[in-house]
Amino acid sequence: MRAIPLLTVLLLAPLSDAITQEQPLQPGQRVRVTVPDLGITKQAATFDALESGTLVVTADTTMRYPLASVTRLETYAGRHSHPWRGAGIGSLAGWAIGFGLWHAADVGCYEGVSQSACAAVLGGGVGAASGALLGALVGGFLWKTDKWEEVQLDRLRVSFVPRRDRFALGFSVAF
């Protein structure tokens, strides 16, 4: 009868090690920490360790935050560019410049069409297209920002708890 719990523990022990060793944070990794109780919002730091419910990070000095007080923790995930945003901004700016130049040049238009309408469609259209192209290039190659991914503070945990004459297997999942 005692062989079944022992066999269960032996079979599930490798699974427990695989789950508990899968840690989303590695020492030396860039992180951003938010601890509202201490007035800290998205403070960039370097992850050092998790020690008994305490997050240890280093910015200028080593800081220790109770994990229960940390509301958001993010890891650095590289840099990314913004070609679509650049194209949108460029097209708006290009339309305004194209409209203004066409209207100021007082270039003739089709019979029965006002100068403003012609400037809006033709000047603005050409300006928007060229502005979108230029904006996409700028956004794609020159405009880069850091990308951060949120770390789930509550992860699946598996633990073996020794009892008097047996082991108990405990699971906890946070939603």
Image (spheres, grey):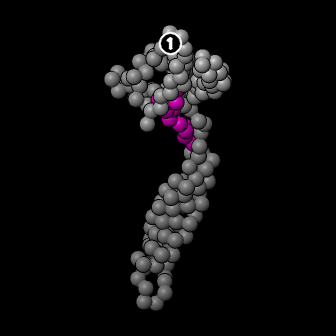
Image point (41%, 18%), residue name? 66
108 relative to 148, above or below: below
Residue 153 visible in the picture: no
Residue 144, located in which quarter of the rendered image? top right
Image point (49%, 70%), residue name? 124
* Magenta range: 144-157
The disc labelled 1 sits on which kind of residue? Answer: Arg
Q: Position of residue 109 (x, y in %)?
A: 49, 83
Specify the quadrant that holds the N terminus.
top right
Specify the quadrant that holds the C terminus.
top left
Residue 172 visible in the picture: yes
Q: Position of residue 133 (x, y in %)?
A: 60, 60
135 relative to 167, above or below: below
Image point (52%, 16%), residue name? 161
Viewer-nearest residue: 161 or 175: 161
Magenta stretch contains residue 102: no
Image point (43%, 21%), residue name? 67
Q: Is residue 28 left or right of residue 103?
A: right
Please give the residue where the numbered disc 1 appears in the rendered image. Answer: 163
The kind of secondary structure element at disc 1 is loop
Most extreme residue toward the bottom, as rendered?
111
Q: Is residue 166 left or right of residue 174?
A: right
Callout 1: few (<14), some (14-19), or many (20+) C-alpha neighbours within 10 Å?
few
Q: Position of residue 73 (x, y in %)?
A: 47, 29
